[in-house]
């Protein structure tokens, strides 16, 4: 009975952890590696296990760094079930299809260059047929329901409060009369955040596998963040510049839409046309609107009171490429929300090309930016960026609003762990080295927790805990 860490060990993306119980193999997440070209090239490497030998997959949530290699897993031989929360299944249907489309376009672009060099073409990492095929393996589960997914393996998903359908994975394991409870946090939400409920608290575990994305920092208070957003819109209104918001299509975009509806009077949103320029985010928003039962009480009341998105009077959905391109010809200032959230692809890059060099433009960063991404360059103060081989001067004002994060910060991670009785062993995953080292020290000093920072390929024997 052991768990092996095969992704998101010493880095944020590529979640992948292999659990072995009674000779059965269960994969926790199967996410894409994101960041630099070198990072993304690693997605093509063989899995460090045989997909044919897996007995089950448990998916914590739909974000691509947790789910994005599932089509590849099935293309390489996996034939078993994929267990996740119902809403995560719905989101994966659109997100994996979108990831496949991007993979096809990336391969097409690369093959044009390879043809000119006389090189052999490459295949996409996976295609839309693979994305459709993998969905036949999904099994949706309710929160807080116990399901025996294999002999000696009982699964319960708890609400993680990170994005719609996100789950803390709780596994009760029995082998040779030995019982162990493994808890994998997935990505934990920011308590008090908009729309979703706070992360569930776990009373008992023999081992906690804990994310550490924001393990070395604290978010601004919610009130400070709301005031800062108000001030950004005031400044931009005076300068008649666009406000560009690179946003993750799932989670962050829906939180922003909710806030723009809730505070449309206080922020003067009636003065602004707001464009959601992301077909994926539009589809994800429609899925969010189908699962309002998963919202917190305030958000349910807000949606009931304002009838879905009617609280944003000048909201426009830009579905087509032509509608997106037309935004660069606007003769009035606008708020443009577009993907991708780390500026690694998508329509936001076109808007940066047309606006980042303008002094009256405001770029509002509302989510985590991994090392090596264009978004991280902007956060770190880059004055020049490269887009499609062209150098663009960054004269725009760049704002980082940590208070809108969908991740728990350092204090919240420690507080969540503190509720687990008896300070069980912790393994930290899903974080950059500095963040993990800082969080490990806090857990040791504040909770007397035995902490290990996962390394690639490391195994932990659950029977000896």
Image (cartoon, rainbow, N blue to C red):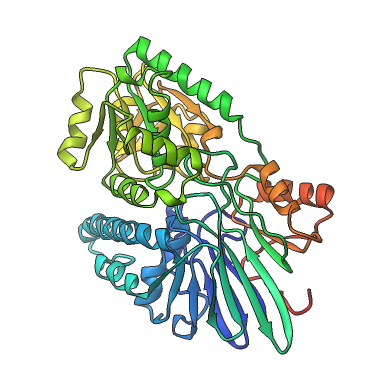
Please tell me in which quadrant of the rendered image residue 299 appears. top left
Seen at 31% across and 29% down, the residue is: 312
Indicate the quadrant containing the N terminus: top left, top right, bottom left or bottom right: bottom right
Position of residue 91 measured from the top left corner of the image (x, y, whole percent) = 36, 57
Q: Left of 61 or right of it: where is 12?
A: right
Classify residue 170 by image quadrant.
bottom right
Measured as percent of width and height from the top left, residue 405 is found at 53, 39
Q: Please give the name of the residue rendered at 21% of the width and 42% of the height, measured from the top-left corner.
A: 319
The quarter of the picture where the C terminus appears is bottom right
Residue at x 34% of width, y 76% of height: 75
Residue 374 appears anywhere in the view? no
Q: Quadrant of residue 179?
A: bottom right
Of residues 58 and 378, the one nearer the viewer is 58
Q: Does residue 438 appear in the picture of this structure?
A: yes
Query: Is 347 situated left or right of 236 in this image?
Result: left
Q: Residue furthest top?
A: 238
Say which of 270 and 358 sits in front: 270
| Residue 383 as seen in the image, left or right of residue 269 | right
Determine whether 150 is above or below 396 in the image: below
The residue drawn where x is 73% and y is 88% is 177
Given residues 232 and 452, the one toward you in this image is 232
**In the picture shown, does residue 290 fall above or below 208?**
above
Give the left or right position of residue 218, taking residue 249 as reference.
Answer: right
């Amino acid at each position: 009975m052991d768990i092996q860490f095969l992704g998101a060990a010493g880095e944020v993306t590529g979640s992948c952890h292999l659990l072995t119980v009674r000779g059965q193999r269960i994969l926790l997440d199967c996410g894409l590696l994101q960041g630099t070209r070198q990072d993304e090239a690693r997605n093509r490497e063989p899995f460090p296990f045989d997909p044919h030998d897996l007995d089950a997959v448990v998916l914590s949530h739909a974000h691509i760094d947790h789910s994005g290699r599932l089509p590849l897993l099935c293309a390489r031989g996996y034939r078993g079930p994929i267990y996740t929360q119902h809403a995560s299944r719905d989101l994966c249907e659109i997100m994996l299809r979108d990831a496949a489309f991007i993979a096809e376009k990336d391969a097409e672009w690369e093959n044009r260059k390879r043809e000119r060099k006389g090189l052999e073409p490459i295949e996409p990492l996976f295609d839309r047929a693979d994305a459709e095929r993998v969905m036949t393996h999904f099994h949706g589960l309710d929160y807080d329901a116990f399901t025996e997914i294999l002999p000696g393996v009982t699964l319960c998903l708890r609400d993680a409060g990170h994005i719609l359908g996100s789950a803390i994975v709780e596994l009760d394991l029995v082998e040779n009369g030995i019982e162990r409870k493994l808890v994998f946090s997935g990505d934990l939400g920011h308590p008090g955040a908009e729309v979703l409920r706070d992360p569930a608290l776990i009373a008992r575990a023999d081992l906690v596998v804990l994310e550490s994305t924001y393990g070395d920092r604290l978010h601004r208070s919610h009130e400070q963040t709301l005031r800062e957003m108000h001030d950004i819109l005031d400044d931009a209104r005076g300068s008649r510049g666009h406000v560009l918001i690179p946003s993750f299509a799932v989670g962050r975009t829906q939180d922003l839409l909710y806030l723009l509806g809730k505070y449309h009077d206080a922020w003067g949103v009636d003065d602004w046309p707001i464009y959601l320029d992301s077909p994926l985010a539009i589809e994800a928003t429609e899925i969010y609107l189908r699962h309002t039962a998963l919202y917190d009480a305030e958000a349910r009341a807000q949606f009931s009171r304002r009838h879905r998105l009617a609280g944003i009077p000048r909201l426009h959905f830009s579905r087509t490429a032509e509608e997106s391109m037309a935004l660069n010809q606007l003769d009035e200032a606008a708020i443009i929300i577009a993907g991708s959230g780390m500026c690694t692809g998508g329509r936001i890059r076109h808007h940066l090309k047309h606006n980042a060099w303008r002094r009256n433009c405001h770029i509002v960063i509302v989510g985590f930016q991994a090392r090596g991404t264009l978004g991280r360059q902007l956060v770190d103060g880059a004055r020049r960026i490269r887009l499609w081989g062209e150098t663009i001067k960054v004269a725009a004002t760049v704002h980082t609003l940590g208070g809108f994060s969908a991740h728990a910060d350092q204090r919240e991670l420690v507080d969540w762990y503190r509720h687990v009785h008896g300070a069980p062993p912790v393994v930290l995953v899903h974080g950059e080295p500095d963040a993990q080292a800082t969080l490990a020290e806090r857990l040791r000093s504040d909770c007397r927790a035995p902490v290990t920072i996962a390394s690639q390929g490391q195994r932990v024997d659950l029977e000896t805990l």
